[in-house]
Amino acid sequence: AQSVAQPEDQVNVAEGNPLTVKCTYSVSGNPYLFWYVQYPNRGLQFLLKYITGDNLVKGSYGFEAEFNKSQTSFHLKKPSALVSDSALYFCAVRALSGTYKYIFGTGTRLKVLA
Amino acid sequence: DAGVIQSPRHEVTEMGQEVTLRCKPISGHNSLFWYRQTMMRGLELLIYFNNNVPIDDSGMPEDRFSAKMPNASFSTLKIQPSEPRDSAVYFCASRGGLAGHEQYFGPGTRLTVT
């Protein structure tokens, strides 16, 4: 069965420090992987995706993510966190068989402390 | 583009009443998704359409829930009769064609059933 795991419910980081939000996946074949961010009382907003090509993908607001096939991971990173990055982050994978639906992780709350 | 439009933004209703949530996807997008978000269960896919045809409705909780997409620019999610446990934020998302694998979410409808 295809699945996505975000092992941390919350990540705290000091402003200016690098941040990492973890995501691992289980899927048949080559995955399409995504990160979304949700601010309070808003819908999810697309940050970045991995489809094919370079393992390091860059997205909005200075975020990047590294696709690691051997570790089946797609961790979200940012070199220097801002207080405004505080939000709920979702990892998602698109199944490439069956009904091709998207599977979302449970979300990780990022708190950047001033 | 105005993005995905959902209405109403807030709905408060009494148990047993019919509730209809509406969604207008981004023009040109050919896939539409309905999600429900609660603190307890996180983000759940209810149903998704491709080219106006329902592809996977395995997430629809029970027969009280129904969804339609009569044309490419409009979809409804109906709950009849509503129950307090249906209280949640309901999101609609759309995705465009072969080149656009990411989903774009609407602002959500916050439903409260008393």
Image (tube, grey):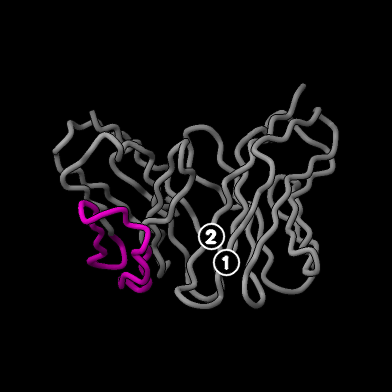
**Residue receiving disc 1:** A2
x and y, in percent, of residue A90 in the image: 60, 48
Q: Are marks 1 and 2 in contact (CB under 8 Å)?
A: yes
Q: Tell me if residue B2 is in the magenta stretch.
A: no
Q: Is residue A15 above or below residue A63?
A: above
Part of the protein shown in magenta: B48-74
Disc 1 packing (10 Å; few <14; some 14–19; many ≥20): some
The residue located at (68%, 46%) in the rendering is A7
Q: Residue at x 76, y 61 (%)?
A: A57
Examine the rendered structure and indicate whether residue A55 appears above or below residue A113. below
Mark 1 vs mark 2: give the one in front: 1
**Quadrant of the rendered structure where residue B109 is?**
top left
Please tell me which residue lies in front, A30 or B92: A30
Q: Chain of mark 2?
A: A
The numbered disc on residue A103 is 2
Please determine whether, in this image, residue A107 is positioned above or below residue A74. Answer: above
Under tag 2, what secondary structure?
Answer: strand
What is the three-letter code of the residue carrying label 1? Gln
Q: Position of residue B44 (x, y in %)?
A: 44, 51
